[in-house]
Image (cartoon, rainbow, N blue to C red):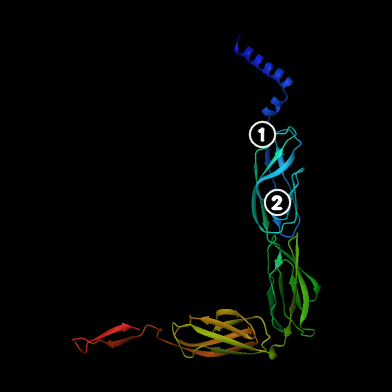
Amino acid sequence: MNQQTKSKLVAGLFLVIALFEPSLVGQASAPIQVSYPLDYVGEVGSPYRGSLQATGGTPPYQNWTVTSGSLPPGITLDNGSGNFKGTPTAAGIFNFTVTVNDSAGLTSLPGNILIEIVAGLGITTQSLPHGFTGVPYYAVLAAIGGFPPYSWTLSTGVLPPDLALDPAAGVISGTPTDLSGSPFAFKISATDGLEVSTRALTIAILDPASIKITLTSSANPSVFGRALTLNASLSPSTVSGKVTFYDGTAVLGIATVNSGQAVFTTGLLGPGTHQLQVRLARPISATISQVVGAIAAGSLLEPVTYPSANQGAHRRRSR
């Protein structure tokens, strides 16, 4: 009997046996595997949907089971369909394994599944600075969580006259021309397409002539190399926003006004006389003349006499 004849007899024998033992056919099929091909990212507070898939074995599949790890809080796995559903309540990356049975009762290999849940969308801007008639206004709204970029809208109320909201950038800008009706109260909403966050805000428009500002320093004259603290005092103390400190035309830094005070510390001033200025808006500023000594603090050398047999000898030490 040649090799070709033997092969045909073996194949025929297997076919006959399989007709009487159907379980052999199931055992010869591909192993069952579980996958999550789309790997959806969820967001806290927004409904989550997704479906596991299986291949191999004999469909339909049933008894989808988490065998290790845990699902994101708020999400469940439907045992019959393999569908995820629910609303996530916590952010994080969640790893777990899932198995499933086919119609022949065989169990799949464990499928490694990962679901990422991001924090819910929230507007982080707590307040907006005051505006001044005739002075350009610019304020950037901020948000975290969700899926940037966000879309911004004015949901209720009105902005001050001649100010507008950029829906893509989240920027309120323009030049106020009228303070009638100030302060202006409104609500701003941000959305990422899944969730909406809303915050109530106000903008007060003031007359620049009504604002007084003074500038002082911690020492004048000061010593080169030693930190110098600048303090800006504003009246009325309810004025909000940010002030910019200048050395001539060069910007030293920016500080936020809190209860009518803004403080900034610098060690960048060289020896000489400096015209320091603080500015809230172009018409609202104050200037002082600051003198900085030419000798660095802590670097003076002075003679020190040590008692020794050689009286009168001098040594130098650094102070």
Residue 271 left/right relative to 71: left
Name the quarter where the C terminus is drawn: bottom left
Q: Nearer the viewer, residue 305 or 280?
A: 305
Could you tell me residue 235's position as x and y percent? 66, 90
Could you tell me residue 217's position as x and y percent? 53, 88
In the picture, residue 158 is in which quadrant? bottom right
Residue 249 visible: no
Other residues around mark 2 within 10 Å, as few (<14) / some (14–19) / many (≥20): some
Could you tell me residue 100's position as x and y percent? 71, 40
First in residue order: circle 2 vs circle 1: 1
Tell me the number on the disc at residue 40: 2
Q: Nearer the viewer, residue 179 or 311?
A: 311
Circle 2: element type: loop
Other residues around mark 1 within 10 Å, as few (<14) / some (14–19) / many (≥20): some
Residue 139 visible: yes
Q: Which residue is at 52% across, 84% downward?
A: 229
Name the quarter where the N terminus is drawn: top right
Residue that extends furthest to the top in the rendered view of this protein = 1
- Asked if the residue under mark 1 is in contact with the one under mark 2, i.e. CB atoms within 8 Å, the reply is no
Residue that extends furthest to the right in the rendered view of this protein = 156
- Indicate the amino acid at tag 1: Pro
Tell me the number on the disc at residue 56: none
Q: Which residue is mark 1?
A: 31
- Indicate the amino acid at tag 2: Tyr
Residue that extends furthest to the left in the rendered view of this protein = 309
Measured Cα–Cα span from mark 2 to mark 1? 25 Å
Circle 1: element type: loop
How many numbered marks does the figure carry? 2
Q: Which is closer to the viewer, label 2 or label 1? A: 1
